[in-house]
Amino acid sequence: MVVMLYPNTQHSHWRRLRAACPQSGPESDKMGLRYIEASLLTLIGVAGLTMLARRSGGFTKLANAGLICAAAGFVWLFAGVLIQALAFGGDFPWMPYFVIPGMLAVIAGLLLIGIFIFRSGVLPRWLGILFIVSTIALMAANEQTAAVLLCIPFGLAMVASGYFMWTGATGYAAAPARA
């Protein structure tokens, strides 16, 4: 299966998706793709933290619940966006019924992952606190105002957790990997 990050914009469904955007054009297409890419990268990071939980042997249920909750929230959000773009031409009256539960599921999943980081000790506890506080700050973020800057602490928490996993500096209180 081939995943196209930059789809062919000549297809009719892509033209309808562009028409649904208030600012149609190359820049809005790039922004839409960046949102999708950022969401996918966030899910990959959460999946990496879940794999770390499995390897350490502790709090796997908490990490799995966080991953499933966040993934379900992202899927619900993407479903609303696709319905809006493809069936309603950008004016979907029930969009709040997709955005509100989807965002709450994403936030709940990320909070569960933050609690996992804090309680398990496989990463520094300060990182768990940063993850939890920055996830709560995400609820006030708005990409159309200066409140978008509230996303920066969450990005830093994701980068820090990726750094610790990449360098192998995990295992602060973790059990050795199972064979």
Image (cartoon, rainbow, N blue to C red):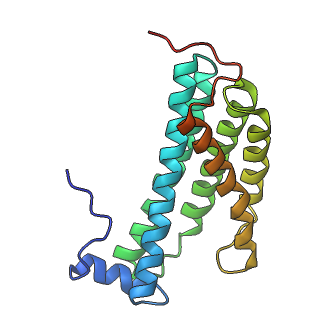
Q: In which quarter of the image is residue 150?
A: bottom right
Left or right? Give the position of 34 relative to 19.
right
Residue at 36%, 79% (x, y): give it. 17
Residue 68 in sight: no
Give the answer, above or below, for where 171 lies relative to 81: above
Residue 176 is drawn in which quadrant?
top right
- Closest to the observer, 176 or 71: 176
Q: Where is residue 105 in the image (x, y as percent from the top left)?
A: 61, 48
161, 120: nearer the viewer: 161
- Residue 177 visible to the viewer: yes
Q: Residue at x 71, y 19 (%)?
A: 173
Left or right of 134: which side holds 23?
A: left
- Give the tally of numbered discs: 0
Q: In this view, does 140 lie above or below 32?
A: above
Image coordinates of residue 61 in percent, x first then y, are 59, 24
- Relative side of 137 to 161, left or right: right
The image quadrant where one finds the C terminus is top left
For this orientation, the residue located farthest to the top is: 179
Q: Position of residue 28 (x, y in %)?
A: 45, 83
In front of the other: 81 or 62:
62
125 relative position to 123: left or right: right
Instruction: Where is residue 90? Give x, y as percent.
Output: 45, 81
Q: Relative to residue 6, is residue 11 depicted above or below?
A: below
